[in-house]
Image (tube, rainbow, N blue to C red):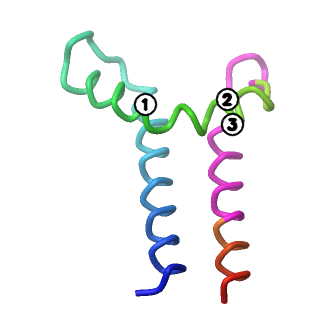
Amino acid sequence: MTFAYILIRLVNFYSIIIVVYVLMSWIPMSEGGILSSIYRFLGKICDPYLNLFKKMVPPIGGMIDISPIIALLVLQFATRLIVNFLL
């Protein structure tokens, strides 16, 4: 296994985690439930990266946050750029 292969797999896994975290934000959860615990855990993993984009991209219409989409695009683009540079 090469470094590029491992990097692509890790980035794809992190992208899936971000998508799950964003989708879970739409689900109403009770405090102390298992979903709430999973959501908080995913937040600790995803929020540091997503907050970089939330500062730069204002919500559309004051409600729709597209920063996760932009964060995923930047992550995928940067990964492909790094992999192409390594090969």
User: In the image, what residue occupies the spot 45% across and 64% down?
Assistant: 10
x, y (%) of residue 80?
67, 73
Residue situated in front as seen by the camera: 43 or 36: 43
What secondary structure is marked by label 2?
Answer: loop
Determine whether, in the image, residue 45 is placed left or right of residue 48.
left
Q: Nearer the viewer, mark 1 or mark 3?
A: 1
Residue bearing mark 1:
44
Image height check: is 53 above or below 15? above
Per the model, the C-alpha gap separating discs 2 and 1 is 19 Å
Q: Based on the picture, tell me whether residue 87 belongs to the magenta stretch.
A: no
Badge 1 marks a residue whose secondary structure is: helix
Q: Are marks 3 and 2 in contact (CB under 8 Å)?
A: yes
Counting residues from the start of the chain, the first of labels 1 and 3 encountered is 1
Residue at 59% across / 39% down in the picture?
49
Q: Which residue is mark 2?
A: 65
The residue type indicated by label 2 comes to Asp
The answer to which image quadrant residue 9 occupies is: bottom left
Q: Write down the region rendered in magenta.
A: 59-78
| Numbered badge on residue 67 | 3
Q: Residues within 10 Å of mark 2 (few under 14, many from 20)?
A: some
Q: What residue sits 62% from the left and 51% below the top? A: 72
x, y (%) of residue 33? 19, 18
- Badge 3 local density, few (<14 within 10 Å), some, or many (20+)? many
Query: Which picture quadrant has residue 1?
Result: bottom left
Give the residue at the far top of this rendering: 31
| Amino acid type at mark 3 | Ser
C-alpha span from label 1 to label 3: 17 Å
Q: Main secondary structure of the magenta part?
A: helix
Check residue 63 for magenta coloring: yes
39 horizontally vs 43: left or right? left
